[in-house]
Amino acid sequence: MTILSDRWIREKAQATGMIEPFVEAQRREGCISYGLSSYGYDARVADEFKIFTNVDSAIVDPKNFASNSFVDRKTDVCVIPPNSFALARTVEYFRIPRDVLVICLGKSTYARCGIIVNVTPLEPEWEGHVTLEFSNTTPLPAKIYANEGACQFLFLQGNEPCETSYAMRAGKYMGQKGVTLPKL
């Protein structure tokens, strides 16, 4: 596998809509950086959040996810309670080529504050908004800033197109829009 450069990412984004909206140069003035980087793309978190709460003493069950285990917020700044968790989504919509695997990594700015973004792959021919998982590992409330950088995506090209892509398997998270909850 080869990691793909800023030039390749820009060309694919502009020619095929691989990333929409696409920010061609990294933006850093007064914000957590986002946009095209040397060997990746720093995506932004949208202003839609699902913040986990224990108000109703719900049990988190990935096979039977209860909607009363979180509260919805549309806000420019999401505050995650201590030792808690929130779901969000990227501003950007991704369309992954058939011969590429994308890996999501958390931003070091958040990691240095004890806020962890889940590492997740975007499989060949998957498309949608990426649901982001933020864990506040600290004993203090933590802020997430909407429309600023949240994670970086690295693009890895396989030696050949895969036999069976995510789209061919009719993957359960294909085409997701908004913050998508676990599905079985």
Image (cartoon, rainbow, N blue to C red):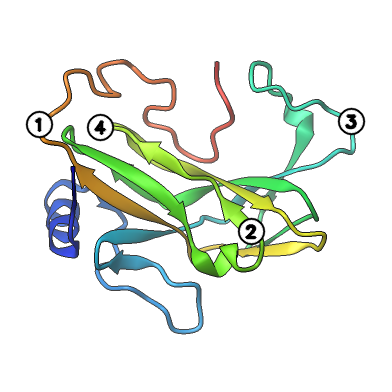
Q: CA distance from mark 2 to mark 3?
A: 24 Å
Above or below: residue 143 compared with residue 172? below
Amino acid type at circle 4 is: Pro
Specify the quadrant that holds the N terminus. top left
Q: In the rendered image, which quarter is residue 157 located in?
A: top left
Q: Position of residue 76 (x, y in %)?
A: 62, 64
- Which element carries disc 1, helix, strand or loop? loop
* Mark 3 or mark 1, whichever is nearer to me: 1
Give the label, 4 or 1, closer to the camera: 1
* Position in image of residue 142 (x %, y %): 72, 63
Viewer-proximal residue among 159 and 142: 159
Q: Residues within 10 Å of mark 2 (few under 14, many from 20)?
A: many
**Of tags 2 and 3, which is closer to the observer?**
2
- Residue type for callout 1: Glu
Give the mark nearer the N terminus: 3 vs 1. Answer: 3
Q: Amino acid at mark 2?
A: Ile
Residue 4: numbered disc: none
The mark that comes first in sequence, 2 or 4, is: 2
- Residue on which disc 3 sits: 57
Q: Are the residues tagged 2 and 3 within 8 Å (C-beta)?
A: no
Report, in whole angstroms, how far the alpha carbon at label 2 lies from the one at label 4. 28 Å
